Amino acid sequence: MSNNLIEIRGVSKHFPDHPVLHNINLEIRNGEFLTLLGPSGCGKTTLLRLISGFEEPSSGAIYLDGKDIAGIPPHQRHVNTVFQSYALFPHMDVFDNVAFGLRCKGIAKDEVEQRVHEVLRMVKLDTFLRRKPHQLSGGQQQRVAIARAVINKPLVLLLDEPLSSLDYRLRKTMQIELKQLQKQLGITFIFVTHDQEEALSMSDRVVVMHDGEIQQIGTPRQVYEEPDNLQVAKFIGEVNIFETKVLAADDKQLQVEIEGKLFTLKNRRKYKAEQTLYTLVRPEDLQVWSPSEVNDTETMFSAVVEEVIYKGCTVDLMLRLMSGKRLAATQFFNEDDEKLDFLLGEAVWVHWIPGWEVILPHEA
Ligand code: ATP
């Protein structure tokens, strides 16, 4: 059997007045934590609804466990969904909410008892059996919703922004719990979010979407460190983008001009001379020095510190180059380095280690 639990082949979805998804091709592996990440309206929820059966594709096909699931109603797909709104039964207590699905299937009382207790232990709610939803915190209600969704042992759990209504701290805690639960259960999770930090920290793979299309599929590291295009680079984290002119190129190296300085960079994507490119450098990959710390400034830019934001373990700087271009730079505290007290208006030198950049073509 293939390791793919779901295969989405050439799926498009059009609503009467507009197209929403265009030629989606995606393979989702057994037991993986996959996240659909993209801005509001890019079609993430629509893709989940196609998998769960609440919508049908306009064209293309979806295979679940090797079978084309066109026309199979949601309750027969072995797919469950956890919504942002929890959707618990308000008049039922925790136990009854979680037991509901099993009772509907006519499962024997003893087995219901045993399975409900087991799943409530997993989500750490075994001491809250008789509470009603309104007597629980947001995080606890979300755990009931998750327990209810996994008790039937679905092949896939779809989670549509399940943490977005929780406050920051609870959200962080729930991210860890959810990831642990997924490992424990071994069920494939397809998680939707527009929060890039959440996507990077939780997923085995991330699918970056924009305007109804998949822009990139990769591990969190791949989409962050090796974005396929500018759209992905800008959506995932902050990035400094330099206009770059290629002066000379061979198979291995590029001689380029950036902000009036000459650099030799690796030619990983086989660019050619005279091409105009973008060089991308993440804020944490920029190094900032005071003039007394450096001798050779040939591949450094002269800049002035315009903003200093203290963040605890980092200092975020906004720098202005002579050309007027602004750069974001994040400096990490290091016990050996006392020079992190940057002053507004201070003159500095800024550079990055060659090889840490990503070079992308101008897009049409
Ligand atoms: P968000 O993060 O805001 O939930 P999303 O990426 O999940 O956004 P979708 O909910 O999939 O986006 O919506 C994609 C587009 O499809 C939007 O423009 C939305 O208005 C439209 N859409 C969704 N459902 C329908 C529908 N039933 N009929 C018509 N248009 C719809």
Image (cartoon, rainbow, N blue to C red):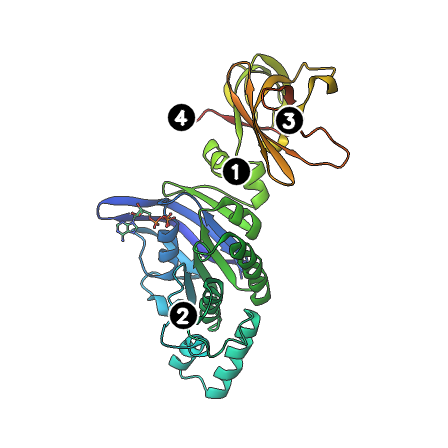
Q: CA distance from mark 3 to mark 1?
A: 23 Å
When the figure is inspected, residue 269 is found, relative to residue 100, above or below; the finding is above
* Label 3 SS: loop
In depth, the one of 104 and 248 nearer the eye is 104
In depth, the one of 53 and 103 nearer the eye is 103
* Label 2 SS: helix
Picture residue at 56% right of the left edge, 64% below the top: 181
Q: Position of residue 360 (x, y in %)?
A: 52, 27
Q: CA distance from mark 4 to mark 2?
A: 52 Å
Tag in front: 1 or 2: 2
Residue 204 appears anywhere in the view = no
Which residue appears farthest toward the right when viewing the image?
336
Tag in front: 3 or 1: 3
Q: CA distance from mark 3 to mark 2?
A: 50 Å
Tag in front: 1 or 4: 1
* Residue 12 located left or right of residue 133: left
**Residue 364, label in figure:** 4
* Residue 244 located left or right of residue 266: left
* Label 1 SS: loop
The residue that disc 2 covers is 134
Q: CA distance from mark 1 to mark 2?
A: 37 Å
